[in-house]
Image: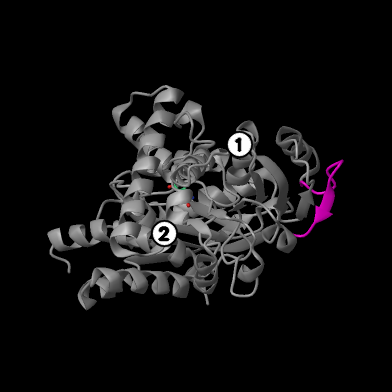
């Protein structure tokens, strides 16, 4: 199943429960607009390489499209469209005044010099600047993109439109209008909803064990928060492989090791493991924080975690969902679990528009409120309709999108 088919399956499941009309689902099955670009980049050796990229705006009934841009060697059009549809759901679930968008460039950013990366990032904006903007479509970081890249993109956009426009992009460096707390927002948002789920089961982080797949922005900060809250993180991994220590990993040292060597593997006092092994470890909490489609019909049966907190987008396939829910696993679905990132992006955009900046504690407090509220809404729908957490999250999101579509007279 490609990621877009996964989205359609999830959409149909929730649409059925809500008894949505065919008109509405017909609208939501298609992205509103997909821009395909090719970006010529002058490489350091004087040659020219051409990179393919996309920006997909799935649905903008609730507001301007919003979502990150990823740089990855495997990016496809279908994947970007699916990710934009998931952003529509995520933004609606968190009650943000946004539709869903996503961008992607097919490139291995690790093979590019800083100069090449800058020319590529500016080149992407040159191709799409007419379609993005603070009231149109607002990009942000995603897999293998970061504040530095956002700064280049904003700068390029501002040059092209001839005015300052910090609200065109979020996840910027603080000095250029970024928000305090945005750096760790995805992870702490996931941490907050996991706390709520544990609370529902009358338990806490104390003495739990966890495994984290992916050690980028979301995964490494999640490791830190769990570690600081008395959960033993016994395994972590990145694209090169994983490490395991049954007594718990000293996460801050692992972060440092990755910074120095480029990977978590070969960390002293830990056993090297594979990414596949990590997913089926005997832990309380599993946090997939890398890419989509890692827990599937093939390995879901072997998953032993009691809680899955989906920091990645789309890490669990629909076949895996069925198996996991039957086993009684509590899944914190991606559109909830990783929504802390886009929620603080929203706060950043609001601050940019006001030109007035908040303290870090204010950002985190507001984020906690929003995440906890979305968790509660999902929990109530689970009870009301007797559905699993994924379906419930889609139901909460779809209700808002459908109301907006109806109010606009679209469907
Ligand atoms: N890329 C992140 C996501 O998938 C953040 C998007 C944003 O901040 O707009 O939710």
Q: Which of disc 1 and disc 2 is earlier in sequence?
A: 1
Mark 2, residues whose alpha carbon is within 10 Å: few (<14), some, or many (≥20)? many
Q: CA distance from mark 2 to mark 1?
A: 24 Å
Tag count: 2
Residue 330 at x, y = what percent? Answer: 50, 56
Front one among 37 and 146: 146
Front one among 344 and 273: 273
Residue 270 at x, y = what percent? Answer: 84, 45
Q: Secondary structure at mark 2?
A: helix
Where residue 291 sits, quadrant-wise, is bottom right
Quadrant in which the C terminus is drawn: bottom left
Residue 286 drawn in magenta:
no
Where residue 373 sits, quadrant-wise, is top left
Front one among 25 and 40: 25
Residues shaded magenta = 263-274
Residue 212 at x, y = what percent? Answer: 65, 50
Residue that label 2 marks: 389
Q: Residue at x 84, y 50 (%)?
A: 271
Residue 270 drawn in magenta:
yes
Residue that label 1 marks: 206
Secondary structure mostly seen in the magenta stretch: loop
């Amino acid at each position: 199943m490609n990621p877009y088919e996964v989205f359609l399956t999830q959409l149909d499941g929730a649409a059925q429960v809500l008894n949505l009309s065919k008109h509405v689902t017909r609208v939501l099955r298609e992205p509103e607009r997909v821009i395909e670009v090719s970006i010529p980049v002058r490489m350091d050796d004087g040659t020219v390489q051409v990179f393919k990229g996309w920006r997909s705006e799935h649905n903008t009934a609730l507001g301007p499209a919003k979502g990150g841009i990823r740089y990855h060697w495997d990016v496809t059009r279908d994947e970007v469209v699916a990710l934009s549809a998931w952003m529509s759901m995520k933004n609606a679930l968190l009650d943000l005044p946004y539709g869903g968008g996503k961008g992607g460039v097919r490139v291995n950013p690790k093979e590019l010099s800083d100069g090449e990366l800058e020319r590529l990032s500016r080149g992407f904006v040159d191709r799409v600047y007419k379609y993005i903007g603070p009231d149109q479509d607002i990009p942000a970081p995603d897999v293998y993109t970061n504040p530095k890249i956002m700064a280049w993109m904003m700068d390029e956009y501002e040059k092209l439109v001839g005015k300052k426009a910090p609200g065109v992009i979020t996840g910027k460096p603080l000095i250029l209008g970024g928000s305090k707390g945005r750096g760790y927002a995805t992870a702490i948002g996931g941490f907050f909803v996991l706390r709520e789920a544990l609370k529902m089961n009358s338990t806490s982080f104390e003495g739990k064990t966890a495994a984290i797949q992916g050690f980028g922005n979301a995964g490494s900060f999640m490791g830190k928060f769990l570690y600081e809250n008395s959960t033993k993180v016994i395994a972590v991994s990145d694209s090169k492989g994983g490490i395991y220590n049954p007594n718990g990993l000293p996460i801050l040292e692992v972060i440092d090791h990755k910074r120095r060597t480029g990977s978590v593997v070969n960390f002293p006092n830990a056993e090297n493991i594979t990414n596949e092994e990590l997913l089926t470890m005997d832990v309380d909490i599993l946090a997939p924080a890398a890419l989509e489609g890692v827990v599937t019909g093939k390995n879901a049966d072997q998953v032993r975690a009691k809680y899955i907190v989906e920091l990645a987008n789309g890490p669990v396939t629909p076949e895996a969902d069925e198996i996991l829910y039957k086993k009684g696993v509590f899944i914190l679905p991606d559109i909830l679990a990783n929504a802390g990132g886009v929620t603080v992006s929203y706060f950043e955009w609001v601050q940019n528009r006001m030109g007035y900046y908040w303290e870090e504690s204010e950002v985190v407090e507001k984020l906690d409120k929003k995440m906890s509220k979305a968790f509660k809404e999902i929990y109530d729908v689970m009870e009301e309709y007797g559905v699993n957490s994924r379906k419930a999250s889609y139901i909460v999101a779809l209700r808002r999108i459908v109301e907006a579509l109806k109010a606009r007279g679209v469907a």
